[in-house]
Image (tube, rainbow, N blue to C red):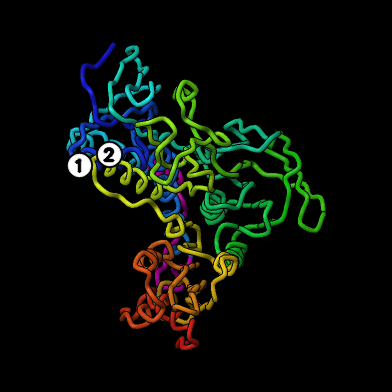
Amino acid sequence: MANGETFDVTVVGSGPGGYVAAIRAAQMGLKTAVVERDPLGTGGTCLLRGCIPTKALLHTADVWEEMKHGKELGILADNLRVDFGAVQARKGRIVNRLSKGIETYLFKKNKITLFKGQGRIEGSKAVIVKGDQGETRVATKSVILATGSRPRSIPGITPDGKSIITSDEILELKEIPKSLIVIGAGAVGIEFASIFARFSTQVTVIELLPRVLPLEDEEISKEAQKVLAKHMTIFTGARTEAVLKTAGGVEVAVKTESGESKSLTAELLLVAVGRGPVTDGLGLEATRIQMERGYIRVDPKMQTAEPGVFAIGDVVTVDGKPHPALAHVASHEGIGVAERLAGKHAETLNYDQVPSATYCWPEVAGVGLTEAEAKKRGYDVKVGRFPFPNLAKPRIVGQDFGLVKVVADGKYDEVLGVHMVGPHATDLIAEACLGLRLETTVEEITRTIHPHPTLSEAMMQAAEGVYGHAIDA
């Protein structure tokens, strides 16, 4: 059955890449459709079972952490406790409202047609949507694939949704576990470890690489690990050798960095070792689209080898290079594709300027080159650092830990990267993002008046530190 319309662009997937691309296309005057198969609705992994619900839980954990130390603030309360059912219900309300808002407000406002079901492409000419009422042929002039990713596992360790779980299942827990082992100390693993450790779960983290958050600047990563280790047990450089389900949960055999064999037990095991692309059911084998390690290969303009078919977000590899699996990357890639389809010039993304953000306690964020990357590329590297505890505001808010680090080119004074760990780092990093975008110099940051007392002063003082001029309070 055909729907009788021809769309200028049809987007398969309604996550932060897909729905943003669709909205921008519609804003540019293109007749736009979206295909979504998820029974939970629109919003993709980020909104339904990723970024948003996780951050809702993290905020509750942040508030709980502050309340536990209320006496230091002069606030006295008896019988403090966590109602985890209410915590989960609040998370659900946030997710549901935002998801419904995409479908019932944003799509309708922008006259976007939503087709519910599994999409299969016929080149760039049509998308066949298999839904509850059979198949619908959606005629189109171009296609944007934005189908995202799903949790990966480890060979020999199969999640069962009960005692061995992924980030999908941990979001739906009915009770706070007494003990939790997390395999993987990237952003996902560390965020969940940070949530439940502060809810009094006994948390153990196992990471194969030498440090937590291994994609961050090494100095920032080590500082984060120092603070995190106060709330949980962390094994870095450790290999998971076997997992056995037991009557009480799981038993995990680990070989530590020193070569010692350990047997760890817990109620739950969270496997958080990254995500893999979702391409099943798309019919890619009948197209000229090239695949690489399961990902859709695209050029810097997000064009696949099939004319008129584009791909964005977690499902792609750009010219075979590592691609950041981040919601804001997918959104900006989608905007670029939509604008180019509408005939507008849109520059390709500079992936060196993509910010990272991890919402654990302490928060970690960065943008641009790390110190090691800058040296590897041959820059005359100068570094400025400033500890948050040397400012008034972090002490006022009770988070007097962490630091800001500025990586600069000594020859031209250009800011190459900014990395931070500490209070509200994920918000503070935006100033650095704009700075890199505008090719800001270190001096321009030092000459910019930052209000006092604020957390943002750490950015200014770290820049001063490049010259050895930081003022320690």
Nearer the observer: mark 2 or 1; the answer is: 2
Viewer-nearest residue: 423 or 77: 423
The residue under the point 53% across, 43% down is 320
Tell me if residue 72 is in the magenta stretch. yes
Report, in whole angstroms, how far the alpha carbon at label 2 lies from the one at label 1.
9 Å
Q: Quadrant of the C terminus?
A: bottom left
The residue under the point 82% across, 54% down is 260
| Residue 79 appears in the figure | no
* Residue type, label 2: Leu
Marks 2 and 1 close (CB-CB < 8 Å):
yes
Q: Quadrant of residue 392?
A: bottom left
Crowd rating for badge 2 (residues with CA inside 10 Å; few <14, some 14–19, many 20+)? some
**Picture coordinates of residue 143, whole percent (x, y):** 34, 31
The residue under the point 35% across, 46% down is 331
On residue 214, the disc is none
**Picture coordinates of residue 332, whole percent (x, y):** 35, 49
* Residue type, label 1: Met
Task: Relative to 226, say whether 21 is above or below.
Answer: above
Residue tagged 2:
341
Residue tagged 1:
28
Q: Quadrant of the N terminus?
A: top left
Q: Which residues are magenta?
A: 69-89
**From the viewer's perspective, is 48 left or right of 10?**
right
